[in-house]
Amino acid sequence: MQQSILFEDDYLLAVDKIPGMLVHKSWLDSSATQFAQNLAEEYCGQKLHTLHRLDRPASGVLLFGKNPDVARTMLGQFSEQQIRKSYLVIARGWTKVSGVIDAPLAEELDKIADKFAKKDKPAKEAVTEYCKLAHTELAIPVSKYPKARYSLVLAEPKTGRKHQIRRHFRKISHHLVSDTRHGDGRHNDLFIRHFGWKQLALRAMQVEFKHPANGQDVVIHAGLTDSWRDILTQLGWSRLINVLDHPIPDWLHHIQ
């Protein structure tokens, strides 16, 4: 199996989705033969229910329910914004120490996958909170600037719009690194040339919720992959590797 198991019991299964893999079969790529859900079902030998989305180029925690009742309960928690999801991102520029991006987002349709969906729907509420963990300045010119600046950010979407974090950070001119759809190609090229980094700098690090069967608090943490440890080291943020390889403490969400 190409994705590691992060959590499993009689009700839920969580995997660490690898970047570039679709969650399930989609018109986005008719040639794809492996999907996160299919691999997870092969592992546990039963039908699973996808509980939330995770962009194809992103990696990290992906949660499945093992029966319809569990799925309904968990989807209810998602819709009521009772589930906390934390993402690690690398963004261009130096963001504020912390902030809230409150900007409604219109439905974003894919030309192929959503060709039958209704167009021109009104924008929906979309809110993302974030805090900066570190920043760096590189002696590498980019665009009109003599040096390139980047921030390591912990983002927490309060709503679940498609590509929400990617679109919200674009709105504040802090595009995510290696985002080929919503990012800045000049910074994407810089990361390829100087660091050999091509994957979207968006990782679902942690999901927190009440267990659907017993109500106990559950924290599922993905930690860092080798590629993430390498890029953090190259950017001078190696001191944070040990911190990020452990569950994210609540205080880290509230840096002021």
Image (cartoon, grey):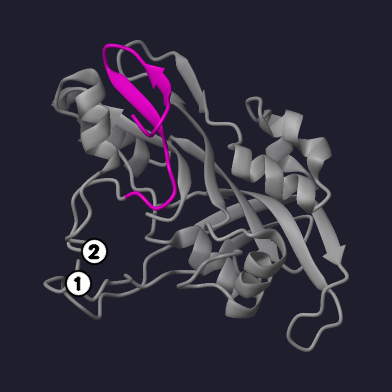
Residue at 64 percent of width and 79 percent of height: 186
Image mark count? 2
Residue at 30 percent of width and 50 percent of height: 22
Q: Residue furthest bottom?
A: 144
Mark 1 nearby-residue class (10 Å; few <14, some 14–19, many ≥20): few
Is residue 50 at least partly visible in the picture? no
Q: Provide the secondary structure element on which disc 2 rests.
A: loop
Q: Amino acid at mark 1?
A: Ile
Nearest the viewer among 43 and 98 is 43
Relative height, residue 186 to residue 82 (above, below): below
x, y percent for residue 39: 26, 33
Q: Are the residues tagged 1 and 2 within 8 Å (C-beta)?
A: yes
- Residue ID for mark 1: 112
- Residue ID for mark 2: 28
Compute the Cα span from label 1 to label 2.
6 Å
Residue at 51 percent of width and 63 percent of height: 166
Residue at 21 percent of width and 28 percent of height: 41
The N terminus sits in image quarter: top left
* Magenta stretch bounds: 1-21
x, y percent for residue 78: 36, 39
Q: Does the magenta-highlighted stretch encompass residue 4?
A: yes
Q: Amino acid at mark 2?
A: Leu
x, y percent for residue 180: 48, 71
Mark 2 nearby-residue class (10 Å; few <14, some 14–19, many ≥20): some
